Image (cartoon, rainbow, N blue to C red):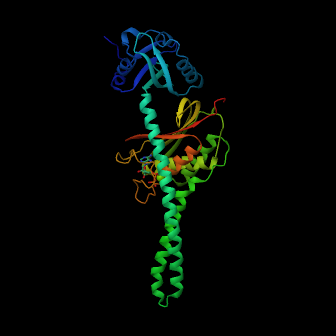
Amino acid sequence: MKSVPFPGLDLLATAVLLLDQRLTLRYVNAAAENLLGLSSKNVVGHSLSHIFPGADELFAAVGYALEHETSFTEHEMALAVAGGHGRLLASCTVTPAESGPARLVIEFHQIDQQLKIAREERMHLQQQANRELIRNLVHEIKNPLGGIRGAAQLLEHELTKLELREYTQVIIKESDRLQGLMDRLLAPHRPPQNGPINVHEVLERVRSLLLAEAPRGIAIRRDYDTSLPEITGDKGQLIQAVLNIARNSVQALQGNGEVVLRTRIARQATVAKRRHRLAIQLQIIDNGPGIPEDLRERIFYPLVSGREGGSGLGLTIAQTFINQQQGTIECDSRPGHTCFTVLLPLPDEA
Ligand SMILES: Nc1ncnc2c1ncn2[C@@H]1O[C@H](COP(=O)(O)OP(=O)(O)O)[C@@H](O)[C@H]1O
Ligand SMILES: [Mg+2]
């Protein structure tokens, strides 16, 4: 009989291992047995190094998590499993546990490498096509718009009946509104102005801006790994990008809930098809209702909005800025938990 100290864990789709302070395996859930091709009764009581021989990346992750008392994610890890399914490509999160028999929790998510690259390639192409489309469309609209506005002004001067100006004013005001929208669509194409950035300064700035505008029932919590190094990039753009993401969270919470701003170091992150040894991971997490299912695949597209009065540009602009810094944004959302993850690569010699 398999002993189940945490029955709920056996119901999870995520592979979970629990270890004690000597890094001896205390528990393996059903998903982990499946993923690793091991049976709980053969591995519980054995050391981690016995099960994953030569897994330096895994031990580095465990070491980091224990030393810094913080959860640590390695995005792509090749694992050899002794007596199990052989080699496995997975992302792995190691979290120190506070109490109970377990001192450390390890979660694995298998990566289907082909699928991931194909998806990223598709997204990349789509983004390029989007940008091109926007640029062309904006130019096509801006030129005649200037003409329409100018003509309305000339007409206004010729009008003898003052009450008719109401109509020319509508033309002028609406032209201005469209002009503003067009400028915002083009704005992200400015070249970035690079300098040193402390990501926590960026998050603190975003936090104070949000606190100023968010209703009282909303808490904005920090969960920072303060050992992160500085990065190089456009600080203004990064603030705007994170603000756009976090503002959506605040809006989704409708006056009640929590936004968490989290920073971590991430290893082996693949960003825009290039693998980076280290990256800075920023997460903006809220416990709101989640992104409506019919929008989930499209939220980064321009003019896609689920909000009354929304422009649908916030995430498009955020994505453009983050891409300009060689980073990526990903989103994972379900009711009660929406997490936007921004990965910003660190130079490989860092
Ligand atoms: N944290 C979130 N929770 C729920 N829905 C979200 C969240 N972030 C984004 N969305 C959805 O994505 C849409 C697009 O966001 P965005 O590009 O910023 O445009 P806008 O905020 O102007 O609608 C939002 O309207 C909302 O429906
Ligand atoms: Mg928005």
Instruction: Kindly identify the residue that appears in the image at 62 percent across and 40 percent down.
Output: 200
> Relative to 329, does residue 3 appear above or below in the rendering?
above
Q: Quadrant of residue 223?
A: top right
Which quadrant of the figure contains the C terminus?
top right
> Relative to 3, does residue 216 appear above or below in the rendering?
below
Point out residue 299 in the picture as x, y percentages from the top left corner.
Answer: 43, 48
Which quadrant of the figure contains the N terminus?
top left
Q: Is residue 29 left or right of residue 313?
A: left
Report if residue 215 is visible in the image: no
Extreme bottom residue here? 160
Q: Is residue 239 left or right of residue 294?
A: right
Instruction: Kindly identify the residue that appears in the image at 47 percent across and 38 percent down.
Output: 121
The residue nearer to you, when weighing 140 against 234, is 140
**Count of numbered circles in the view:** 0
Extreme right residue here? 195
> Relative to 180, does residue 342 appear above or below in the rendering?
above
Report if residue 75 is visible in the image: yes
The residue nearer to you, when weighing 136 against 158, is 136
